[in-house]
Structures are given as C-alpha cells and as structure tokens.
C-alpha cells in the first residue's frame, strides 16, 4: 500500500471518527436545532453567564413537559472516561432532587444491560421523559465542554456499538480527545480528575435546574 493511499484511508477514518463522536454532527438537522442546544465549559466559573444560561435552558426543558422526568446516566465504571455517567448518577442520588435516577457506580447502565433497564423504566414509569447523560470524545480543545441537546442519546458511539437510542434530550460531555484508530483507548486513558470536574459541574447544573435555582 502506498503512503498516499494509507494517508487517504487514515484521513477518511479520522473524519468518520469525528462524525461519530462529535457532540454535534454538523448535519442540517443539527443546524436547525442549534437554537435548542447549549454548552458550558468546566474551565469557566460556575457563577458565570454561560453557566446560568445552561441552567436556565435545562430548567426550561424540564418544566415544559408534564411527563415524569427520568435521568438515565449511561456508562461503565470499568473505564475512566466512560465512568462519567455513573459518577453523575451517584452524585445525583446524594442530592435532594427527588427524581428517578438510573445508572450509578453501584448499579451502572451499560451496553450489556441497557435494554433491560429501558424495559424496567417503561414498565415502572408511565410515558417517562428521559434525559440521557453520557461521556463523549471530541477535539482536544473541547475537553471539559458539556452539551445539552434536543434528541435521543446514542450510547456506545465511542466504540462503535449499536445500542438503542435513549430519551428526548441528552447531556454529553467531552472527557478526552478522539483517537479514531483507538477510541476505546482514548476513554481508558482519560484523567479521573477531568471526569470528576465535569461530573461535579453536571450535577450542580441539574440540581439547580430541578430545584428552580436558575437565574434569569
């Protein structure tokens, strides 16, 4: 195989990988929904304008539905980067939000049991409004960014797993940069410090939104 052909294949895989993992896929439907999405970087202060806007946006999403809100935190504690969901779930369980939370460090929701958990949720709750929470990979400059987006969460994209789409809205955070040749390794090599910082910010955003502590 020539160097040029190898470079072409590698560039294609890189573009494909970025399309799979990028928090916003760049398609027309994403542009149309841009006004219904927002983001916040943990590098910013939690007292800043961007943080308050995020809280207010999530508050709007949660109050505009009459259905029971369920937080589904997806991920595995066996991978540092993928542990974001279960860590957020555990932190939420320790707060006073009094809303159902699925997916914790003790009882994670992952590829092997997500279908079973979704069935349990739908049997236990009448027409629930599910907000999915998960980690993702992206550009190195995006590490620490938290995104709120309308539409279903698609878990397992980091390792190209075909899992069911989840919920009406979702929050995703970039925990590490994307290596399209080894995305699973990118998740495994993620710093726990980064994950904890993001998890704390996500938990604070959610609790303030649920408890009505947003600012106008």
Image (cartoon, grey):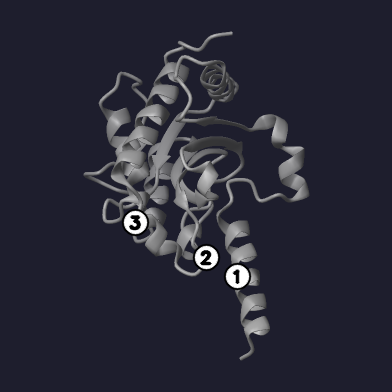
**Which of marks 2 and 1 precedes in the sequence?**
1
- The image quarter in which residue 49 lies: top right
Image position, residue 153 (x, y; %): 53, 47
Q: On the image, numbered disc 2 is attached to which residue?
A: 180
Q: On the image, numbered disc 3 is attached to which residue?
A: 189
Q: Give me the residue at 38% from left, 63% from top.
A: 185
The C terminus lies in which quarter of the figure?
A: top right
Query: Is 162 or 25 nearer to us in this picture?
Result: 25
Q: Give me the residue at 63% from left, 46% from top.
A: 24
Q: Give me the residue at 67% from left, 82% from top.
A: 4
Task: Kindly state the secondary structure of the residue where label 2 is placed.
Answer: loop
Image position, residue 197 (x, y; %): 35, 33
Q: Please report contact status of discs 1 and 3: CB closer than 8 Å, yes or no.
A: no
| Residue furthest left as drawn | 106
Q: Please report contact status of discs 1 and 2: CB closer than 8 Å, yes or no.
A: yes
The numbered dot on residue 13 is 1
Vertical comparison of 10 with 126: above or below: below
Vertical comparison of 193 with 69: above or below: below
Spatial CA distance of label 1 from label 3 is 20 Å
With 208 as the anchor, is 27 left or right in this view?
right
How packed mark 3 is, by other alpha carbons closer than 10 Å (few <14, some 14-19, many 20 or more), is some
Viewer can see residue 74: yes
């Amino acid at each position: 195989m020539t160097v040029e052909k190898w470079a072409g294949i590698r560039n294609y895989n890189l573009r494909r990988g970025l399309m799979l993992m990028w928090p916003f896929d760049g398609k027309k439907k994403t542009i149309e929904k841009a006004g219904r999405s927002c983001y916040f970087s943990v590098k910013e202060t939690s007292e800043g304008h961007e943080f308050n806007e995020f809280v207010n946006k999530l508050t709007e999403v949660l109050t505009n539905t009459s259905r029971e809100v369920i937080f589904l935190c997806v991920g595995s504690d066996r991978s540092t980067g993928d542990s974001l969901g279960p860590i957020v779930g555990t932190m939420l369980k320790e707060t006073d939000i009094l809303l159902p939370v699925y997916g914790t460090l003790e009882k994670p929701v992952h590829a092997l049991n997500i279908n079973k958990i979704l069935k349990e949720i739908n049997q236990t709750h009448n027409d629930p409004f599910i907000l999915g929470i998960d980690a993702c990979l992206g550009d190195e400059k995006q590490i620490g960014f938290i995104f709120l987006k309308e539409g279903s969460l698609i878990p397992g994209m980091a390792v190209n797993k075909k899992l069911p789409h989840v919920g009406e809205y979702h929050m995703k955070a970039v925990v590490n940069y994307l290596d399209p040749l080894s995305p699973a390794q990118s998740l495994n090599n993620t710093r726990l410090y980064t994950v904890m910082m993001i998890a704390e910010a996500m938990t604070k955003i959610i609790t303030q939104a649920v408890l009505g502590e947003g600012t106008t």
